[in-house]
Image (cartoon, rainbow, N blue to C red):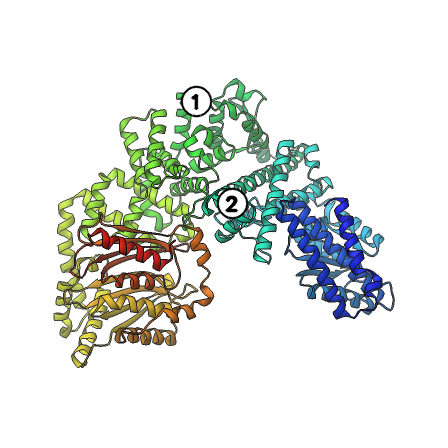
């Protein structure tokens, strides 16, 4: 904030809050006056922000505004004190002390008194209360402490957050000598002599904080303050610099050669940008918020005047800027931290007495124009890359093989030599061989590629991958930017090289057996490359780009075919397992023919496994893995021996019937035999004998009800809790699938029950089994008997009353959950009618924002077209529902008329609210 602006603000305060105007006002009238003053000045700051004004000035002007308010509150409190001079010194700490406050940030204050909180005189206590209560009533969130100098120093030595807040403190009003004594004592007792310990703890705190936020700035929903490359990384530079150099001016890091002038400009730009984003987030939300959610990204991009056409393009451009700035701050702050760390280590190695093991640790090696020491690799001279440009690739192989980190200076050297990575460099056989060697070193590829990417080499050497840098992925299930996702997939593959986790035994065995890791890792690098082209089918676009890379690398035919297969088909295993009826042998056979060989299948399984985990590790569950594993094993069996594949199914069903009837009384055996004859084959594919026995018992109960019922029988219902998966299984038997599915989903939604998966089975005698996996909104099994009874009552009402509607019930029940409408406008929801994938059924493929009642909406819309749901695959991941519903018309046939298909598509789009 300029002096002119500060003077203007002070003048406004003088005009409105002059002592003469406030002297005779009671507290209520003063509060009204303060609020009016704040409202006017806050609006001025907002207008300045909206006009594109500096974010630094916005945050400083707001801090100055509160300082001026506090000056008047302090003055009023002193005036009303009997002593008239309570010995209380008011100190701004934290962001307020830094002179930077975002629109809804907390105001942190330290009230310093010689006797501290316990010995506080009444007049001092009254002054503090007067100030705090007025701040609260003005609407501020205030963090405060009342301490003596001794208490402040003691607290700072036990809590690094307190220590960091004192570093940037500013005295506002009171006893200046007391404040100076505190700061002198603070430096002598908390900083001097404790530099090494503080640096160690601060670097550990940074590591843990980065770990919490996935060690990357490239999250789909980043934390602007605490995340990697967030504002806290900038603050840490201030604190560490103060402890090591007794300066809070980051510019001093340039003078001490801890930071280059270029990097200083980058982090200042990053700081300005992040502050501007956070300012807008606070203004938009009208509260303090730090997570840049998908919804907020669109709102902020619009408010910051991104000029691209269409909301998705605005978000993409905005988030690319965000990732660029936050990544610059993240990497530069890490380098500065590393320099401070190495400076300390260098000091230690100069000590006269050093043990044998330590001397080995600090051993210096020279190789290929580089030097290694302190577990880092340095350039031996300033001409290392001019002498031999190929070292720009070899450096990463050296670091990989020797397990060395790149020294901060080396990163700077690499950036200064980007220009040597040209067409000749990319087509060089020796560079290709080095790159192949890096990608062939199982278990150590991801780290090398991350180093190459963060230093800017990987994207320049493989520009097809480079185009993904900072690219936003609009799919619901992606947690990272496109480039970060790709690097994480390579790291997930690396993890298979070691470990004894029994759950990964299958993948670890496949990984250790593959003969060409280079092609597998290269396929990972290129599998999403087509996303940068904004193609409707990124797999085909990625394959085209992979073809050009294969030519550049002169890959032989066998390797090239494997690469193109993996890139072009990298979603096929996941897509088939999650959207197709994999219980149908014909689906397995069709998929096996597409894959072509066991070799292709094994490589594809590894890519799918790593791709899924690299998308979002939290979404990789046993439930999500099960269909992938099943499809892989079934396909493997078919590829090994197609004849035995078919024969086993016949034998396995006979064995299943035998084991199921063993668990049943003799009176149930005829029902069991009939059940096996009338149920579709897919019902038996992955169902244990004990589950089938339970269904047969339920079926016997259903038929008893049928026999005694004078009209339509009541549905037979059964709940089973599955604690280990955090859900319940809800089985319903009735006779009309057309109506049952819609009523059942409506009853569940009306009780705020979330549907995880759904299976629909129609017997030859029109008896239907609907089996749902469901959970509460807290992702727990349904245990409330009252809720179960309500669901059953609502279900029966819907089945027996033609005019019964669930819509109002669902709307009332989920009123507080309906925050999805804005997101639905911003992110891709799709409906696709597929008549090619299945010979007997029309497939409705839906991608939509997951919400309570979605499946009811879909099935109700389908019911209006007099279609029968034969099968459904329901998948939910990271707030997205990916559903495939198999339907036939009233005659049991596929829908083939274009007019009918168009009406169905439009009806579903309208129901799901796709514009």
Residue 335 is at least partly visible in this image = yes
Examine the image and state in which quarter residue 570 appears: top left
Secondary structure under tag 1 reads helix
User: Badge 1: how crowded within 10 Å, few (<14), some, or many (20+)?
Assistant: few
User: Badge 2: how crowded within 10 Å, few (<14), some, or many (20+)?
Assistant: some
Judged by depth in the image, the label closer to the viewer, 2 or 1, is 1
Secondary structure under tag 2 reads loop
Residue 612 on image: x %, y %:
37, 47
Tell me the residue that label 1 is attached to.
423
- Figure check: 613 above or below 664: above
Q: Is residue 233 left or right of residue 86?
A: left
Identify the disc placed on residue 215.
2
Earlier in the chain: of badge 2 and badge 1, it is 2
Q: Is residue 731 left or right of residue 413?
A: left
- Residue at image x 69%, y 37%? 251
Front residue of this view, candidates 666 and 289: 289
Residue 49 on image: x %, y %:
64, 48
Front residue of this view, candidates 754 and 499: 754
Identify the disc placed on residue 635.
none
Residue furthest out toward the front: 899
Q: Is residue 1 left or right of residue 181?
A: left
Residue furthest out toward the top: 387
């Amino acid at each position: 904030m300029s002096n002119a602006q500060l003077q203007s603000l002070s003048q406004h305060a003088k005009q409105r809050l002059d002592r003469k105007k406030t002297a005779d006002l009671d507290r209520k009238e003063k509060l009204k006056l303060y609020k009016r003053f704040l409202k006017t000045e806050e609006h001025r700051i907002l207008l300045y922000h909206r006009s594109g004004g500096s974010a630094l000035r916005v945050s400083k002007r707001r801090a100055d505004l509160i300082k001026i308010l506090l000056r008047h509150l302090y003055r009023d409190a002193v005036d009303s004190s009997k002593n008239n001079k309570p010995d209380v010194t008011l100190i701004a700490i934290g962001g307020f002390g830094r002179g930077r406050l975002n629109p809804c940030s907390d105001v942190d204050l330290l009230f310093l008194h010689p006797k501290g909180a316990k010995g506080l005189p009444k007049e001092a206590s009254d002054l503090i209360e007067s100030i705090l209560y007025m701040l609260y009533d003005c609407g501020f969130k205030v963090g405060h402490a009342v301490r003596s100098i001794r208490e402040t120093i003691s607290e700072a030595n036990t809590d690094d957050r307190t220590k960091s807040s004192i570093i940037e403190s500013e005295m506002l009003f009171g006893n200046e000598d007391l404040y100076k004594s505190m700061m002198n004592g603070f430096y002598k007792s908390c900083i001097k002599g404790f530099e090494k310990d503080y640096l160690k703890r601060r670097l550990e705190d940074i590591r843990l904080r980065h770990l919490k936020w996935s060690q990357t700035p490239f999250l789909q929903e980043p934390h602007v303050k605490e995340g990697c490359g967030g504002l806290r990384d900038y603050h840490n530079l201030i604190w560490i610099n103060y402890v090591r150099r007794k300066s809070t001016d980051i510019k001093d890091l340039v003078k001490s050669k801890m930071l280059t002038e270029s990097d200083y400009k980058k982090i200042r730009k990053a700081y300005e940008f992040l502050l501007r984003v956070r300012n807008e987030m606070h203004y938009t939300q009208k509260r303090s918020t730090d997570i840049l959610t998908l919804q907020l990204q669109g709102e902020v991009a619009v408010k910051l005047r991104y000029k691209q056409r269409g909301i998705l393009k605005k978000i993409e451009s905005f988030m690319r800027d965000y990732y660029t700035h936050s990544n610059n701050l993240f990497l530069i702050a890490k380098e500065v931290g590393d320099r401070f760390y190495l400076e300390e280590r260098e000091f230690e190695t100069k000590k006269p007495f050093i043990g044998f093991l330590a001397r080995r640790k600090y051993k210096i090696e020279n190789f290929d124009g580089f030097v290694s020491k302190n577990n880092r690799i340095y350039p031996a001279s300033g001409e290392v890359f001019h002498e031999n440009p190929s070292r720009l690739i070899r450096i990463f192989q050296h670091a990989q093989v020797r397990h060395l980190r790149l020294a901060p200076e080396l990163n700077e050297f690499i950036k200064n030599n980007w220009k040597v990575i040209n067409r000749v460099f990319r087509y060089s056989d020796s560079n290709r061989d080095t790159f192949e060697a890096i990608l062939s070193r199982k278990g150590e590829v991801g780290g090398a590629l991350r180093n190459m990417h963060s230093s800017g080499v990987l994207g320049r050497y493989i520009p097809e991958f480079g185009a993904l840098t900072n690219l936003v992925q609009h799919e619901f299930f992606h947690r990272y930017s496109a480039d970060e996702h790709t690097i994480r997939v390579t790291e997930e593959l690396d993890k298979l090289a070691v470990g004894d986790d029994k759950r990964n035994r299958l993948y670890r065995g496949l990984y250790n057996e593959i003969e060409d890791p280079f092609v597998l890792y290269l396929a990972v690098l290129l599998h999403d490359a087509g996303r940068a082209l904004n193609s409707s089918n990124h797999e085909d676009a990625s394959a085209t780009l992979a073809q050009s890379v294969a030519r550049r690398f002169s890959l032989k035919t066998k390797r090239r075919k494997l690469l193109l297969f993996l890139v072009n088909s990298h979603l096929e295993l996941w897509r088939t397992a999650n959207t197709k009826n994999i219980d149908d042998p014909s689906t397995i056979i069709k998929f096996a023919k597409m894959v072509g060989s066991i070799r292709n299948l094994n490589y594809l399984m590894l890519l799918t496994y790593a791709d899924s985990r690299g998308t979002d590790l939290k979404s990789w569950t046993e439930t999500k893995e099960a269909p992938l594993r099943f499809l892989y094993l079934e396909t493997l069996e078919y590829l090994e021996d197609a004849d035995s594949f078919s024969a086993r199914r016949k034998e396995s069903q006979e064995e299943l019937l035998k084991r199921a009837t063993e668990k049943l009384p003799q009176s149930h055996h005829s029902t069991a035999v009939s059940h096996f004859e009338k149920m579709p084959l897919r019902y038996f594919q992955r169902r244990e004998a004990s589950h089938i026995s339970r269904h047969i018992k339920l079926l016997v109960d259903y038929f008893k009800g049928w026999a005694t019922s004078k009209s339509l029988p009541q549905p037979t219902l059964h709940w089973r809790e599955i604690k280990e998966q955090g859900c319940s299984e809800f089985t319903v038997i009735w006779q009309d699938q057309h109506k049952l599915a819609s009523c059942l989903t409506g009853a569940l939604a009306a009780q705020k029950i979330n549907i995880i998966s759904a299976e629909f089975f129609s017997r030859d005698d029109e008896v239907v089994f609907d089996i749902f996996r469901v959970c509460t909104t807290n992702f727990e099994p349904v245990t409330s008997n009252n809720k179960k009874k309500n669901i059953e009552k609502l279900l029966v009402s819907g089945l027996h009353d033609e005019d019964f509607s669930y819509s109002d019930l669902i709307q009332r029940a989920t009123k507080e959950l309906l925050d999805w409408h804005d997101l639905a406008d911003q992110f891709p929801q799709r409906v696709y009618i597929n008549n090619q994938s299945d010979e007997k059924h029309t497939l409705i493929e839906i991608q939509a924002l997951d919400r309570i009642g979605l499946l009811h909406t879909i099935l109700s819309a389908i019911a209006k077209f007099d279609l029968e749901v034969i099968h459904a695959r329901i998948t939910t991941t990271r707030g997205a529902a990916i559903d495939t519903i198999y339907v036939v018309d009233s005659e049991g046939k596929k829908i083939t008329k274009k007019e009918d298909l168009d009406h169905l598509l439009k009806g579903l789009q309208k129901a799901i609210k796709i514009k």
